[in-house]
Image (tube, rainbow, N blue to C red):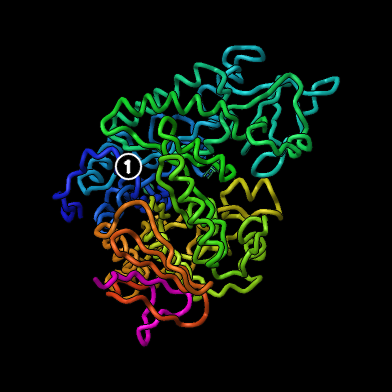
Amino acid sequence: MTSNIDTHQPLANDPTWWRQAAVYQIYPRSFADANDDGIGDLRGIISRVPYLQGLGIDAVWLSPFYPSALADGGYDVADYRDVDPRIGTLDEFDEMVAALHAAGIRVIVDIVPNHSSDEHVWFQEALAAGPGSPERARYIFRDGLGADGSEPPADWDSMFGGLAWTRVPDGQWYLHLFAKEQPDFNWDNEEVRADFRKTLRFWSDRGVDGFRIDVAHALTKELGDSLPTQAEIDAITEPGAHPLWDRDEVHEIYADWRKVFDEYTPPRIAVAEAWVSTPRRPRYASADGLGQAFNFDLLEADFDAEQFRTIISDNLALSAASGSSTTWVFSNHDVVRHATRYALPARNGSTTKQGRDWLLSGGTEPAADVALGLRRARAATLLMLGLPGSAYLYQGEELGLPEVADIPAAERQDPAFFRNPGVDVGRDGCRVPLPWTREGKSFGFGEGGAHLPQPATFGELSVEAQDGAPGSTLELYRAALALRHELQTDETLEWVPGRADVLHFTRPNGWHVVTNFGPDAVPLPDGEVLLASEPLPGGLLPGSTTAWVRAAV
Ligand code: GLC
Ligand code: CA
């Protein structure tokens, strides 16, 4: 299969390659399983390099593939400089990087610096060494409150529900902002800092092109002797004043990492996962820091012209100010897939987690309009791929996969489900293994079955079913990504005024992108229609459809 790889376009030594790249996120355990044990692996990725090349992406980002007990889908890392034996070996990693590079695809790996796994050798040493030891000083241990120390040091909630402190047998407590198997590192500790520099060099030396930084806004914390309560923390609104999140000191770490990135040619890149307010984002994206930051604004928006317009304008202004390029995301491994989000009623600014109630109902309430959701998702993606900046895609969205809502409790894996009974069903529904073929055990994911159950509808959404099928979502992504390479131009756009429910912008080279968010068909600008997310009856742009037009000259 690898013989299909086109090696005629070697990667140029271009330090700006990331600015408008299309990056495809692979969740390795659910992508392709080459040795039929039910778990996706590096050999599986290697076998699909021709598929990735044919898709037309510029880079892949791999979610964690490191040794892990999988308390949080691999975001609980036991060893930052190795590959989980269930996923592969370091030699296979090198082979994968070489195959992707030969296909013109760069490689970004996930770095999880806020916390390790409780199986990490340092945490095991910390437990063994006892209170006050240098081993314990790599994490955040505290004595408990109350006469016998049996009360937690603070009443803080973990991100996945439940308490953020867990007691160890000798009576001390450790902090974990996420699951209890994810102890937070103490970033005031120079050993921790040195170890992450070592990790960044380890992967950079192996040819990795960049890093996605997990919860980049956590790391440094302001923990005095007496800790505030959750209520006191919640009352803090002043930017930068929160003791746990988005502290200014975190940028010292990223300035230090920037020196490591710049040791390489071209410099390694990084993108921050930082759930911070929009005005706080540019610092994560600054050129003397990580260089780029995710903008999750579109991911949280309804399919709505006004919301999209504001978000796009604001983020282009922000990136102009930071000097970075902006990023766009509709789906990833943490959220309900966008084909399903757009099948549900609009959120209208609600802060409840997207799709929460629908997931809790097992995907029945409210009824999802599957066809409309997919139609809108295709329109939204075609709009995104016409925007300046980089586009982050999540495996399976090119097939229009829906969120899987009916996973039985016994098969769920996400700690958000276990730690938050009845409140959160977690993120397993977007992590279901990909369907490659119409038939067969696990639809071609592997002969060993899928580690999360696939619905019967996955067969008709498989790569095999969509490959070469006119109008399929896969062919739409392929066409759009190929054209985007030809059309990509300066990082600006100009809005063309018009109806409130239509967004129309032009790029400097006469590339028009028009999305109709409303129900009624509308006329298209003059020129050649290059691509559309749906057929255009009568030459008009129907509702929930995007078209790319090259202006007549
Ligand atoms: C990030 C990851 C998410 C993980 C969490 C803790 O938000 O994207 O999957 O659970 O960090 O590492
Ligand atoms: Ca496997």
The image shows residue 545 at horizontal and vertical percentages of: 43, 74
Ligand 1 position by quadrant: top right
Residue on which the image places disc 1: 107
> Does any portion of residue 456 appear in the rendered image?
no
- The front one of 240 and 60 is 240
- Residue beneath the point at 70% across and 25% down: 173
Q: Residue furthest bottom?
A: 538
Whether residue 534 is in magenta: the answer is yes
Vertical relation: 377 (above or below) 199: below
x, y (%) of residue 471?
34, 75
Q: Residue 325 appears at what percent x and percent y?
A: 40, 45
Placement of the N terminus among the 4 image quadrants: bottom left
Q: Quadrant of residue 488?
A: bottom left
Residue pictured at 50% horizontal, 82% vertical: 520
Q: Residue at x 20, y 52 (%)?
A: 2
- The three-letter code of the residue at mark 1 reads Val
Region rendered in magenta: 533-553
Quarter placement of the C terminus: bottom left
From the viewer's side, name the closer residue of 374 and 47. 374
Q: Is residue 457 visible?
A: yes
Is 51 drawn above or below residue 457 in the view shown?
Answer: above
Q: Residue at x 53, y 72 (%)?
A: 500
User: Quadrant of the rendered structure where residue 357 is?
Assistant: bottom right
